Amino acid sequence: MSLDDVYRQVVMDHYQNPRHHGHLAHPTLSVGLHNPSCGDELHLDVLVDEDGVVRDAAFEGQGCSISMAAASMFVDRVRGKKIAEARRIAETFKDLLRRREADRSVLGDLEALEGVSQFPARVKCATLIMNAFEQAIDRIQAEGGDPK
Ligand code: ZN
């Protein structure tokens, strides 16, 4: 089995069995985002505590396998992480898809989406969840709760 096959299986597994799918009972903030170029829609709930840790997160949405698999992988990856660490994961993933140097060790299953870098139109699908997360965190920090 080639690495491509392994990656494809990881992506399909997240698409068919999404982790942390649904809503949180008491999110700190929710963000909805839409990717018009493909039709993907995502809703993200984030719960951040006073220490700046992403205590919980959940997503719901409709869209292509890349957008949904990326959401499942990303949410699974950032739960329990400090905000700064979670931001770094999002930025590292975007670097990977832009074919820049990226520290893969922080990416976990997200690395399986590297092949998307060959399809610039689909990069927006893969990064929609990160954009939703960054918007949520920006707003939480701007609204003053001041989690680091
Ligand atoms: Zn898409």
Image (tube, grey):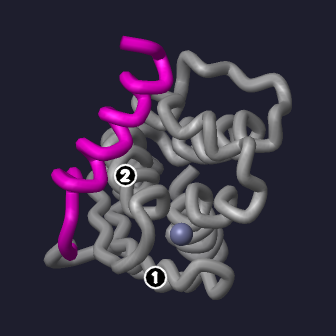
**Label 2 amino acid?**
Val
Q: Quadrant of the N terminus?
A: top left
Q: Which residues are magenta?
A: 1-23
Q: Who's the residue at 20% across and 75% down the image? A: 23
In what element is the residue under mark 2?
Answer: helix
Q: Position of residue 29 (x, y in %)?
A: 41, 78
Q: Position of residue 93 (x, y in %)?
A: 64, 40
Q: Is residue 59 above or below residue 4?
A: below
Q: Is residue 46 above or below residue 100?
A: below
Which of the 4 image quarters holds residue 24? bottom left
In what element is the residue under mark 1?
Answer: strand
Q: Is residue 103 above or below residue 60?
A: above
**Which tag is nearer the camera, tag 2 or tag 1?**
1
Left or right, 107 with reference to 98: left
Left or right, 115 with reference to 21: right
Residue 22 magenta = yes
3, 130: nearer the viewer:
3
Residue 41, which numbered label? 1
Given contact means CB atoms under 8 Å apart, are the residues at marks 2 and 1 in contact? no
State whether the magenta stretch is mostly helix, strand or loop: helix
Residue 143, can we see it? no
Report how far apart the C-alphas of labels 2 and 1 lie in the structure.
Answer: 15 Å
Which of the 4 image quarters holds residue 20? bottom left
7, 127: nearer the viewer:
7
Q: Who's the residue at 47% across and 16% down the image? A: 3
Instruction: Provide the residue designation for mark 2.
Output: 75
Residue 15, can we see it? yes
Crowd tier of the residue under label 1, counting other residues whose Cα lies within 10 Å: few below 14, some 14–19, many 20 or above: many
